[in-house]
Amino acid sequence: MRTFLVTIFALFCIVTSFGQNYNSQWLNLNYANDGKEYHNLDIYLPNNQKSTHKVIVVIYGSAWFGNNMKQTVLEPLGNKLLESGFAVIAINHRASSDAVYPAQINDVKAAIRFVRANADKYKIDASFIGITGFSSGGHLASLAGASNGVKKFTVGKKTINIEGDIGVYPSVSSSVNAVVDWFGPIDMALMNECKKPKEGNSPEAALIRGNPADNLDMIALLNPITFIDKTDPQFIVIHGEADTIVPHCQSELFAKALKGKGLLSEFISVPEGQHGPVTFNESTFKKMNDFFLKESQKK
């Protein structure tokens, strides 16, 4: 856990150079209509002359422990997307200490509904909404894409409402059109070297308020692979081979499942890539931007 928090701190420090790559901004818009800081989002429009902009939602990594870290995703991902002409939506979500899963994905979907419902007001072209995130943000981005159109879902004896009822736009779609997953955890039943659940006070245990090995139905409902079908959007999966926080094999499992459904555009495995450093590089950023541009042109 200590290593993970040090890594997140290092990523936070990267945000010192987020430049004036935006033309307009709206900060701390509350997408749940409840005044809670963890339900705020920021909107940035790129520096160009277009009247509307297709959009990418970006989600920070925090092992689901953070509830007000939307600024930390701007420099690693947001800046690059603005340079490519996308509007960028950086969102907060409830931490595992605030609420048990599926609160976190409920928040993501509520933010997407808010953006789509208010597209005209913020000069957004909602015909294309992509989503990306790193670490736990990659998990939530992947889960959002894999569960397009899903309201409630049951595994074994456990049922969750994955859509949720946060905010004032329950009838608006929360679907997304493309996903880039940066080293997100996927199968929490296999987080220990992709062989078995982690023991002790793991982030996933905090998320479900229980021991993963004793709650495999709920762990399956955390897994984006549980939800994927052929109607879901295209994905890129990016993971460093030297990642000591989220095992590289997590993305191998995910890429294989996506490929089996025809949903994998590319699996990018970065030699010597860590949990952020080295994996974040000009080549992988370009892969992300080119993918989103290609998918957005289909809309």
Image (cartoon, helix red, strand yellow):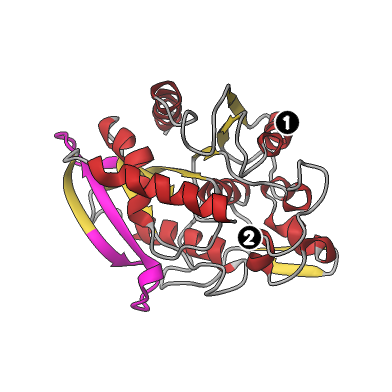
What is the span of residues highlighted in magenta in the rendered image?
27-53
- The residue located at (73%, 31%) in the rendering is 256
Q: Quadrant of residue 250?
A: top right
Q: Secondary structure at mark 2?
A: helix
Of residues 110 and 231, the one drawn nearer to the viewer in this rendering: 110
Q: Quadrant of residue 105?
A: bottom right
Left or right of 248? Residue 278 is left
Q: CA distance from mark 2 to mark 1?
A: 25 Å
Residue 82, horizontal then vertical, whole percent: 27, 37
Pointer 1: residues within 10 angstroms few (<14), some, or many (20+)?
Answer: some
The numbered mark at residue 177 is none
Q: Secondary structure at mark 1?
A: helix
- The residue located at (51%, 50%) in the rendering is 137
- The residue located at (24%, 60%) in the rendering is 27
> What's the amino acid at mark 1?
Lys
Quadrant in which the N terminus appears? bottom right
- The residue located at (61%, 44%) in the rendering is 245
Of residues 144 and 19, the one drawn nearer to the viewer in this rendering: 19
Q: Which residue is mark 2?
A: 203
Left or right of 22? Residue 105 is right
Let me know if residue 40 is in the magenta part.
yes
Residue 77, horizontal then vertical, whole percent: 37, 39
Viewer can see residue 61: no
Residue 181, horizontal then vertical, whole percent: 54, 39
Q: Which residue is mark 1?
A: 256
Label whose residue precedes the other's in the sequence (2 or 1): 2
**Residue 236 to residue 193: above or below:** above
Quadrant in which the C terminus appears? top left
